[in-house]
Image (tube, rainbow, N blue to C red):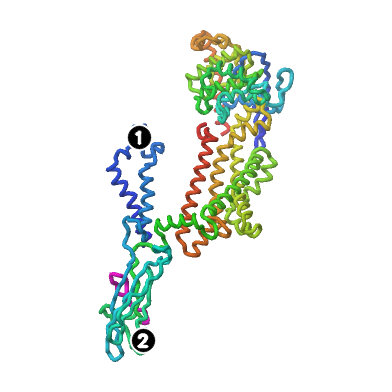
Amino acid sequence: MRFDLPNGGHVQALKNVTLDIKSGELMSVLGPSGCGKTTLLNIVAGFLAPTEGKIMLNGHEVTGPHPERGMVFQQGALFEWMNVRDNVSFGPDMKGMSRKESAENVEHLLDIVGLQDFKEKAVYELSGGMQQRVALARCLANDPDVILMDEPLGALDALTREKMQSLVLDLWKDTGKTIILITHSVEEALLLGERLLVMAPRPGRVHKEYRLPFADLGVGNDLRDVKKHKDYNTTREEILEMIWNMEEEIMGRAEESA
Amino acid sequence: MTGILVLALYVGAFFGSYLILSRLLQRYFAREGFNKLKTVTFGDESAVKANRIASFLSVITVFFLWVAFTNSAIPLPKLPGPFDGDVTFTYTATLPDGATDDADVTIRVFREDIQQTLDEDGNPGREPPAPEVEPGDGFAKNDSLTVARYGFKVIPVWNNDDVSKSDGSKITHLNGQPVEPGQKITIAEGTIGLTDKGTPTFEPKTGLRMARLYLPAPEVVLERFIRLNQEGYQGFTLWEHTRYSLQRVLLGFLFGALIGIPIGYAMGLTNWSRGWFDPIVEFMRPVPPLALIPLMIIWFGIGELSKVILLFLAALWIMIIAARSGVSGVAISKVHAAYSLGASKWQILSRVIVPNSLPEIFTGARVAMGVCWGTVVAAELVAAEVGLGKMIVVASKFQLTDIVLVGIILIGIIGFLIDVGVRALENWLVPWKGRV
């Protein structure tokens, strides 16, 4: 993926990123800012066309956004002119499904994400954590094959975040969806990533890939217990060290060129 | 002079009422609720709440000042008024041979708006007759005449004298005081003096109140308001004048919004439209609608069509820009989310962009309504057959200041109500505004 700049130069945002994601996998992507995580996700979602290479899903090439790939954004992507139920029903509505047909599924999803008492509330009346629950339910209502999450819990406070992490894990296990989750929190990547991809910047590339047991351990369990796992802290230190070095490198390079 | 006095009284009322009331009604001056606990309030805008007593007093103060500076019948404190009634002064005529004679001048000062008042039978008032006086003896005879308040009279005292001015009779004293031509003497009832040619003059004291021509009293304006509703002015009742003005504004705004909002959306959504309309919008936006009035009159005459087109043009650019910035205000993540949920382009427009741009459109609508209301009055001032602006400008030509005031107050109230109405509609349709 190459971006041309207005001044004639260009930035190689991504290079040689090859991934094979199996159905039902939960992959978290981690990396220092500017390493192309969001660009990668936008390409997978179909919002950006890659300059080289292609994305294949279900045997066909990705050329644009499609309901088979659902998105959960950091914040502010809910439709505040609709109430909670209408937000979640948005996908089925777009398909032309009548409210009668979609109602059962929508109610069920709202119950799963714990919004049973807030179905008629306006979105702007909800807290940040509840808004993200709506976003999750809205995405699931469309029954996508892949769920793409762009720092979905990034704007939440630490306590809400932990709760939401459990929710994401439970939903993943219950629905069996393939999930790609972008985050800049190492802990979140460790806890939620069955596969963990560490990316390096300039050009954006896959630096290292892990396969971790913590996501499976975390399903239905207390995430604080998972953190006590013997491998958890060593992996965490290792990844932090890795990203720290990348940041150092970027800063050093910036100083050189300055 | 009077202006400085008004300002001084107003400033005095502002500070004085605060100093007095903040001590007397401490209960209403304390901060309420959570603000009571704040120790830092100066600089914390959220702790500032309008004191409704002040709002009430502000309106009352304007009313008091209005009454105080007019010859109102309302029993409220008023500034010293003009002289009203009969006044007599003495002049001394001297002949070239040194013979002198005294005679009295009696002047009846009547209210300047006597013809606009009604007597018990409903007939307009008339100027009173001059007081009857004895001619007296000597070669100078007593005179009697009338003058309106705020007026000025040159008194041809020689008209009934035995010796005329051309015979050498000169006025040398007024009220026994020696005067030269061009000099003036102040008496309790006004100013007496001699012109440069030596003819006596009288100017009744004006006081500090305004004549009806400049500032009609509140009850005069109210009475005019009632009469305008019953009898109308220039062939239309007040309601009809108002309705025509409002109708023009609403029609012009409606067409402006109907055309402008789709163009604004198009400019926010396609390259071609943005390129196509950009030069026109950027060119027309800074042209004040008032500058288009002459052209509209040349093209479409002074009827309804020219007004509606003018207001359409006034609203159009504002609505285009509002809709365009409404589109650019849509967070791209919302659009992406909607596409990922399977929305088509049409659904993106109708279900995401339109609702999301409503706050901007309402802001634009408020501005456009305000501009339209100002423009319609101005357009009617220039040329119209009916309308509030036309009523004002015709009334001003006949010096009917009370009609002008009725018109201005009504224009202000309607402008305010329009804004309140649009804001209420906005709160109802866009409850999420400012909360996301």
- Look at the numbered discs 1 and 2 and tell me whether their residues touch, using CB distance below 8 Å: no
Residue under the image location 31 percent in, 76 percent down? B106
Residue at far left of view = B176
From which residue to which does the magenta span run?
Answer: B183-197
Residue under the image location 45 percent in, 59 percent down? B402
Q: Is residue A182 left or right of residue B47?
A: right
Across and down, in percent, residue B66 comes to 38, 56
Q: Quadrant of residue A196?
A: top right
Across and down, in percent, residue A28 comes to 59, 18
Q: Chain of mark 1?
A: B
Residue under the image location 29 percent in, 40 percent down? B26
Earlier sequence position, callout 1 versus callout 2: 1
Say which mark, if any, is on residue B32.
1
How dense is the environment of label 2, judged by Cα within 10 Å: few (below 14), some, or many (20 and up)?
some
Q: Is residue A235 left or right of residue B222?
A: right
Q: Nearer the viewer, residue A221 or A85?
A: A85
Across and down, in percent, residue A120 comes to 54, 24
B50 versus B213 height, above or below: above
**Given the image, on which type of amino acid does mark 1 rest?**
Glu
- Cα separation, mark 1 vs mark 2, equals 79 Å
Residue under the image location 51 percent in, 24 percent down? A128
Q: Nearer the viewer, residue A37 or B193?
A: B193
Residue at far right of view = A60
Q: Nearer the viewer, residue B25 or B322?
A: B25
- Residue B224 visible in the current orientation: yes
Is A32 covered by the magenta stretch? no
How dense is the environment of label 1, judged by Cα within 10 Å: few (below 14), some, or many (20 and up)?
few
What secondary structure prevails in the magenta region?
A: strand
Say which mark, if any, is on residue B165.
2
